[in-house]
């Protein structure tokens, strides 16, 4: 389980880093006027480079993590299948609609309604 928790933390951190990068990119785009074609083109190149670097870094971290925990995927899958086997969905009673509930209440308490 600690490996799963660690992986979730890493994914959450990756999402946070991605959001921060998007905010930084948005600020950079707002600082360059649209009329300045040269700076705008350079900005687009910088943005593409930053995004590529971040994606590569995240991919490498994920690969390193999966190399250090090779049984992570199978253990997680086994626990999910065990949990599904414990669940008994077929024997669940059918849900009662609002109209059926109202009729039951009217039968139980005839003078109330």
Image: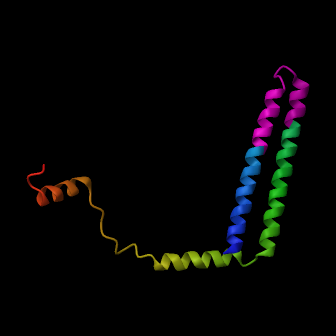
Q: Is residue 65 above or below residue 11?
A: below
Q: Residue at 81%, 66% (x, y): give it.
A: 63
Residues 7 and 91: in front is: 7
Q: Residue at 80%, 38% (x, y): give it.
A: 25
Question: How was the colour assigned to the protein in this rendering?
Answer: rainbow
Q: Position of residue 55 (x, y in %)?
A: 81, 53
Quarter of the image with the N terminus in it: bottom right
Task: Determine if the magenta segment contains residue 42.
Answer: yes
Q: How many marks do you count on the picture? A: 0
Q: Magenta part of the protein: which range?
A: 21-44
Which residue reaches farthest left? 111
Q: To which quarter of the image does residue 76 belong?
A: bottom right
Q: To which quarter of the image does residue 7 belong?
A: bottom right
Q: Is residue 14 left or right of residue 103?
A: right
Q: Position of residue 86 (x, y in %)?
A: 47, 79
Q: Position of residue 100 (x, y in %)?
A: 21, 57
| Magenta span main SS | helix
Residues 55 and 1: in front is: 1
Which residue reaches farthest top? 35
Q: Is residue 15 left or right of residue 50?
A: left
Task: Determine if the magenta segment contains residue 34.
Answer: yes
Q: Position of residue 11 (x, y in %)?
A: 71, 59
Q: Residue at 71%, 73% (x, y): give it.
A: 3
């Amino acid at each position: 389980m600690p490996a799963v928790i660690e992986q979730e933390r890493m994914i959450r951190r990756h999402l946070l880093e991605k959001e921060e990068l998007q905010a930084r990119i948005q600020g950079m785009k707002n600082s360059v006027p649209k009329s300045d074609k040269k700076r705008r083109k350079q900005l687009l190149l910088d943005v593409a480079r930053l995004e590529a670097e971040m994606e590569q870094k995240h991919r490498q971290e994920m690969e390193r993590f999966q190399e250090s925990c090779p049984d992570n995927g199978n253990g997680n899958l086994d626990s999910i299948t065990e949990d599904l086997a414990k669940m008994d969905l077929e024997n669940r009673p059918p849900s009662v609609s609002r109209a059926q509930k109202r009729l039951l209440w009217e039968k139980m308490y005839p003078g109330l309604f």
